[in-house]
Image (cartoon, rainbow, N blue to C red):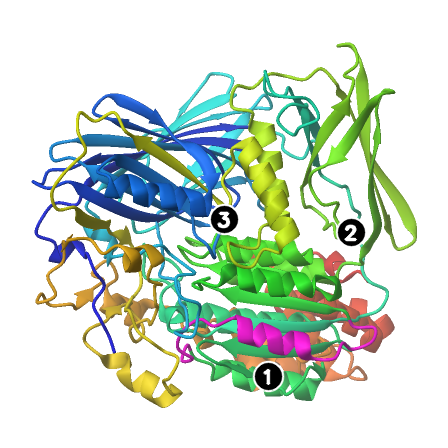
């Protein structure tokens, strides 16, 4: 039974009380400090209780929350979550003003902010502050994202009651969001700034003369059709560094906040190497929910997600090494696998998989990722072939911590490489499952290509395993380092690694220094990365390193409000309360008891809508068959996303709303409930999205055989733009298999036509070159020289070096 989402802006008879969100951002080196203010005003006649659900990056360490109501400042305190909820309810029922900020029970990247008893005509400004370490992209950019899109989280009806969002979140098309967003950012680095890029329109960027600082601000009229993403390029970024921060004054020693904290940033110089044997079980878990019918980005007509996913799977299949094992799973409300269990990678199994990929569609309903993960982990491991799991999803699930916990339990037997597709993907899910298994996480937004990021991850997975990873400290007598981050078990080439520690004992004189050394073994050779640093701690009023250290510790233990084991919960609560960093077990609460008299009269509930790009309906999927599910996809009472049927997502109702129902709803159920996302033009989407069969590069890759070779046939001739007869006549060495000639031509064509996309075809080229040398032998040089002339190419023959 469908019911319309409550509180849609288009259905409300009174203005939404949230008027604006203003964000101040300070990026110093690779750490961001953020202050976000939510400005409310009650223009109605009754006291308001306002609910607002919004996304945040799961790496955010929220450490401050305060309210200014009609000029009066109220600073919130961090309490155990159940206690904070009870105190909030009691304050509201007694007519006091109260403010509650909490992390979602089942996902670390969704927060809810409640404003209770806002009097008529009153204004309130709620400010939350957080710090965050910024991830490093492959091209050296530091990436900051201010999530503006909250896609609905999907949950089956059999899920636990009240375990997710604390209220049903109303939604509006992104262009109809009733509040504004402003952002002002300062970027600074002692190494100098090359450039700053932003995914959204910005005012002209101002640089200081020496380019050690830059000022950026969003242009007016942000449309909420995308997350706000900043890419910061420094002149020098791959430099190891150590920062020591002084503890908080008047805090007892031997505590995390009282002792100095240290942050170490390593860039291990791991040499590029190839595994001596091709081994591994590669399992690709692909989202096939309805949302995959949406475009890769919302700004321009672009490739549909499902088409990009299919193309990516073709790339991955062609790049696998001979002798490995593989399987492909598709998941939605239920899941399917291409093979009953992983199969050996051969020409026959690859062709079977390719046939299935090309007919694949986003037709499996919702997003239920836990069931296929359980199925994958239930399979018997293949001796000598460690499991490498690749998960692709737009991240719209509610039981995030349950998924992360399942991955963590199986973390010792596999690595998980996760990919968040499109705007609004859950950072909690994508980063959490990668962190739990020693893998790596990627996000694909804007005009980024899924293919390049997936192939980079595959290349990492094929690297020889770095073993015997250890970290050692050389400190003066009487001083020791207590690790707050888990030591790494896996390190990838080109990846930054950050570790936090607490310095305990007696701090030495100011001139003293320490050393920290990272050791690891690669293919029998031991490597060391050592950094010397000053032990003179620096003061920081925001205690940034301490907060980040606390967040790092919490992330390793916190599995959600209901999933965290008792011992871990105790540690999470201790660190969270001591350091003032929010967790799934704590919440910020502020109560204003200084009103002249408690507020009287009916309390109106107002649900602030969030911008959502995709469909949402309060739809119960559990009892439905696939057939009936798809039959209802054409229902008019759905939000729709261009390119496919309406999306079916279910937001979880709250325990709070069941305990205390508001006296009046700002929602008129008699209004029409169909909302079309006009920000996406259906005609453009249907006519302009990329069909990968028309792409010459994909056509060429599709023709490659599992062993890396190409056959000399009409299909190859069409892609190369020459006749088959001319290709056959130009074969320089008649004694050589024609496949050798075809393979050389294909590789040269790749370098000629798609050199800028080499990161995507590098692995399959490597297979091709190895095959050429093993089959053409001494004739290779002659084939290459003839092919360069035949295609009138300027490619350097050195690309065929073994």
Left or right, 789 with respect to 398, comes to right
Left or right, 714 with respect to 367, comes to right
* Contact? badges 1 and 3 (CB < 8 Å): no
Quadrant, the C terminus? bottom right
Residue sitting at x 61%, y 75%: 374
Quadrant, the N terminus? bottom left
| Nearest the eye: 478 or 352 | 478
Determine whether the residue tagged by mark 1 lies in a helix, strand or loop: helix
Q: Main secondary structure of the magenta part?
A: loop
Q: Nearer the viewer, mark 1 or mark 2?
A: 1
Counting from the top left corner in percent of width and height, residue 78 is at 46, 35
- Residue 145, quarter of the rendered image: top left
Question: If you read the primary sequence from the N terminus, does the residue marked by circle 1 or circle 2 appear first?
Answer: 2
**Magenta stretch in the rendered image:** 362-385
| Nearest the eye: 10 or 252 | 252
Residue 273 visible to an observer of this rendering: yes
| Nearest the eye: 57 or 104 | 104
Residue sitting at x 67%, y 74%: 377
Question: If you read the primary sequence from the N terminus, does the residue marked by circle 2 or circle 3 appear first?
Answer: 2
* Contact? badges 1 and 2 (CB < 8 Å): no
In this figure, which residue is indicated by the disc labeled 3?
584
- Residue 71, quarter of the rendered image: top left
Can you tell which mark lies on residue 790? none
In this figure, which residue is indicated by the disc labeled 1?
353
Left or right, 540 with respect to 288, comes to right
Q: Which residue occupies the extreme right position in the image?
A: 524
In this figure, which residue is indicated by the disc labeled 2?
272
Q: Nearer the viewer, mark 2 or mark 3?
A: 3
Determine whether the residue tagged by mark 3 lies in a helix, strand or loop: loop
């Amino acid at each position: 039974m469908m019911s319309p989402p409550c509180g849609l802006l288009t259905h409300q008879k009174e203005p939404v009380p949230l008027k604006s969100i203003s964000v101040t951002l300070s990026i110093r080196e690779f750490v961001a400090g953020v202050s976000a203010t939510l400005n409310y005003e009650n223009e109605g006649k009754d006291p308001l209780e306002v609910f607002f659900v919004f996304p945040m990056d799961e790496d955010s360490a929220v450490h401050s929350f305060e309210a200014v109501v009609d000029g009066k400042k109220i600073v919130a305190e961090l309490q155990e979550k159940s206690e904070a909820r009870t105190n909030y309810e009691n304050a509201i029922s007694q007519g006091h003003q109260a403010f509650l900020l909490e992390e979602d029970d089942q996902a670390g990247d969704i927060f809810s902010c409640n404003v209770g008893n806002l009097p008529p005509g009153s204004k309130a400004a709620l400010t939350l502050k957080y710090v965050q370490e910024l991830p490093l992209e492959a091209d050296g950019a530091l990436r900051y994202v201010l999530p503006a899109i909250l896609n609905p989280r999907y949950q089956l009806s059999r899920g636990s009651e009240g375990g997710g969002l604390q209220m049903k979140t109303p939604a509006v098309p992104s262009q109809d969001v009733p509040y504004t967003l402003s952002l002002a950012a300062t970027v600074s680095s002692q190494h100098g700034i090359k450039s700053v890029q932003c995914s959204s329109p910005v005012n002209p960027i101002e640089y200081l003369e020496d380019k050690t600082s830059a000022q950026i601000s969003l242009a007016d009229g942000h449309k909420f059709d995308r997350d706000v993403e900043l890419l910061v390029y420094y002149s020098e970024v791959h430099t190891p560094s150590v920062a020591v921060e002084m503890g908080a004054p008047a805090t007892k020693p031997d505590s995390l906040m009282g002792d100095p904290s240290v942050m170490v940033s390593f860039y291990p110089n791991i040499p590029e190497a190839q595994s001596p044997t091709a081994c591994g079980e590669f399992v690709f878990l692909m989202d096939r929910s309805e949302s995959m019918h949406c475009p890769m980005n919302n700004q321009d007509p672009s490739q549909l997600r499902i088409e990009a996913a299919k193309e990516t799977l073709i790339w991955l299949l062609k790049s696998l090494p001979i002798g490995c094992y593989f399987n492909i799973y598709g998941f939605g409300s239920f899941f399917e696998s291409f093979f009953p269990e992983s199969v050996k990678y051969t020409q026959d199994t690859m062709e079977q998989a390719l046939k299935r990929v090309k007919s694949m569609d986003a037709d499996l309903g919702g997003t239920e990722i836990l069931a296929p993960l359980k199925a994958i982990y239930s399979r018997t491991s293949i001796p000598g072939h460690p499991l490498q799991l690749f998960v692709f999803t737009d991240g719209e699930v509610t039981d995030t911590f349950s998924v992360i916990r399942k991955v963590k339990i199986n973390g010792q037997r596999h690595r998980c490489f996760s990919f968040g597709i499109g705007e609004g993907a859950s950072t909690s899910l994508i980063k959490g499952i990668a962190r739990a298994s020693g893998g790596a996480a990627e996000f694909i937004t804007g005009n980024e290509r899924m293919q390049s990021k997936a192939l980079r991850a595959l290349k990492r997975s094929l690297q020889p395993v770095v073993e015997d990873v250890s970290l050692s400290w050389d400190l003066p007598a009487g001083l020791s380092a207590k690790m707050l981050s888990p030591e790494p078990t896996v390190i990838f080439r080109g990846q930054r690694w950050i570790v936090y520690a607490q310095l305990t004992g007696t701090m030495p004189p100011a001139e003293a220094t320490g050393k920290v050394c990272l050791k690891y073994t690669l293919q029998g050779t031991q490597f060391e990365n050592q950094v010397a640093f000053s032990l003179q701690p620096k003061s920081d009023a925001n205690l940034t390193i301490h907060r980040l250290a606390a967040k790092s510790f919490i992330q390793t233990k916190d599995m959600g409000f209901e999933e965290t084991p008792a011992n871990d919960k105790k540690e999470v609560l201790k660190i969270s309360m001591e350091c003032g960093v929010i967790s799934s077990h704590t919440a910020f609460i502020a109560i204003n008891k200084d009103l002249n008299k408690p507020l009287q009269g009916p309390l109106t509930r107002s649900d602030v809508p969030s911008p959502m790009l995709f469909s949402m309906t309060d739809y119960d999927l559990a009892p439905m068959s696939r057939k009936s599910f798809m039959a209802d996809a054409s229902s008019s009472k759905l939000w729709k996303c261009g390119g496919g049927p309406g999306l079916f997502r279910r937001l979880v109702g709250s325990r709070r709303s069941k305990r205390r129902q508001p006296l009046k709803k700002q929602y008129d159920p008699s209004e029409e409930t169909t909302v079309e996302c006009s920000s996406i033009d259906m005609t453009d989407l249907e006519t302009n999205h990329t069909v990968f069969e028309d792409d010459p590069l994909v056509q060429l890759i599709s023709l490659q055989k599992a062993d890396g070779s190409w056959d000399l046939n009409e299909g190859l001739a069409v892609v190369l733009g020459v006749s088959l007869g001319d290709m056959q006549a130009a074969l320089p060495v008649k004694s050589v298999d024609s496949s050798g000639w075809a393979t050389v031509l294909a590789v040269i064509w790749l370098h000629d036509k798609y050199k800028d996309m080499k990161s995507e075809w590098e692995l399959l080229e490597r297979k091709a070159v190895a095959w050429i040398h093993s089959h053409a032998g001494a004739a290779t040089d002659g084939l290459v020289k003839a092919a360069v002339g035949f295609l009138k190419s300027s490619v350097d023959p050195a690309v065929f070096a073994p």
